[in-house]
Image (cartoon, rainbow, N blue to C red):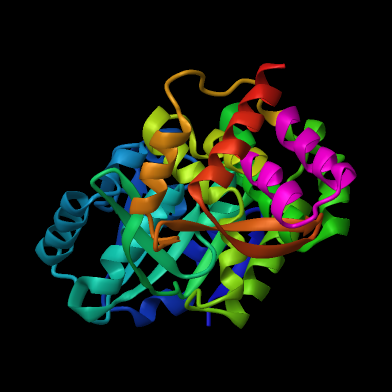
Amino acid sequence: ETKIEIGSGLVAKLAADAGLKSYSSIHFVVDANVARLHGNTLLEPLIDAKKFYAVPPGEKQKNIKSVAKLLRWLHDQNADRKSLLIAIGGGVVTDLAGFGASTYMRGIAYISLPTTLVGQVDAAIGGKTAINLGGTKNIAGTFYPPKRVICDRDFLATLKKSQLRDGLVEAIKIFAARDNAGFRIHTARLGDYLNGNDLTQLISAAVALKVEVVNRDPFEKDLRRVLNFGHTAGHAYEAITGHSHGKSVAFGILLALELSRKLAKLSERDSDVVDAAVRSLYQRFAGKEITSESLWERMLHDKKSSGGKVNFVLLKKCGEHTVKSVDYSQFARAFEQTREMLEA
C-alpha cells in the first residue's frame, strides 16, 4: 500500500521523519537539474552533503545501461535488503529508480519524490516502473509500488511553462477519460495554472482518479488501460519526433478524438471541448516527418498491439472511455483528418 502525500513543506517533514531510522541505510537518486536548482535550499535538510546518484536530465537516461550503473552504485554503497532508495526527479528518475529498487537484492524499499507536474499527476503514481529499449518506450519494467509518494508543490515553482504544459496534458487525459465534472472544472483554469496558480487541487483530483483505477486493476489487465488514452499514438509520435512527452500525448489525444467520433459515437460537442483544451496548450505539431505508416510501424512494436491491429482507448463521451481494436486503414484515415484539422 503506497501512502501519497500532497502539499507544501513535505521534504523537510520527510527529513525529520523518525521512521527513516528503521532502514539500515538511505540512498538518493536525484535528477542533476533538480540537485542544481534545489540542492542548497529545498533538498538541504534531506540530502545534506550525503553522496547521491545524479541522473543527467532527459528521456534517454531510461535505458538498461543506466539501470546497471545505478545497481552497481548501490552495491558499491553497501546497500542491503533493509536499505531505502529515495528517488527525486521527474518521471524518468522515478521510473529508473523504481526499476532499480525492484531488482536490487530482489527488491528494496523506495520512496518517490516527483519534482515535475507530470510526475506528480501521473508518472510517479501507480507502482509501474519502466525503461525504454531500442526506441520503444517503457517496454521493460516491473509493477513495484513505492512505500510513499511525496508530491511537494514547492518543486513546481521552478518549472518552465513547457514542463507545466506536459503535466497539464496528463491531467486532461485522465479527466477526459474518467471524470467529466473534473474535466470541466480544471480545463477552465488551464490559463491560471500556466501562470503559476496553486496546482494542489488539480494534482489531488488527478491522483485520486489514477489511484482509484490502479487499485481496481493493479496489473493492467483491463480498466487500467484507460491511462493509455492519447499514449498509443503519442508514444510513437514521441519516438519519431523527439518532441516532449506532453506534446506527443496531446497529438495522441487529438488523433484518438478523431477515431472516437468514427468508432465510439463521440459527439461533436464533446470532441470539440476536449480538442479545445488540448489545443489551448499546444498549437503546433510535427509536419511532414511523421506519416501514418511510420506511426503505425512504431505502434505495432509497442505493447498495445495484437495481430496487425492496435488497441486504442477512445471516448464514448467526455468522462467515459472504451477500448477498440483499430486497423491500419481506420488509423490512416483518422491521421489524415487530424493533420488536415491542425493545418487548417
User: Magenta residues, as a range?
Assistant: 255-280
Compared with 198, 281 (above or below) is above
Looking at the image, residue 315 sits to the left or right of residue 224; the answer is right
* Residue 109 in view of the camera: yes
Residue shown at 51%/71% (left/top)? 148
Looking at the image, residue 272 sits to the left or right of residue 132; the answer is right
Compared with 334, 110 (above or below) is below
Compared with 2, 259 (above or below) is above
**Residue 277 location (% of width, % of height):** 77, 37
**Residue 90 location (% of width, % of height):** 46, 47
Residue shown at 60%/37% (left/top)? 333
Corner quadrant of residue 125: bottom right
| The magenta stretch spans residue 270 | yes
Looking at the image, residue 50 sits to the left or right of residue 204; the answer is left
SS assignment for the magenta stretch, majority? helix
| The magenta stretch spans residue 136 | no
Residue shown at 43%/43% (left/top)? 296
Please state which of residues 264 and 33 is positioned toward the viewer in this rendering. 264
Corner quadrant of residue 95: bottom left
Residue shown at 80%/31% (left/top)? 191
Please state which of residues 65 and 335 is positioned toward the viewer in this rendering. 335
Please state which of residues 72 and 80 is positioned toward the viewer in this rendering. 72
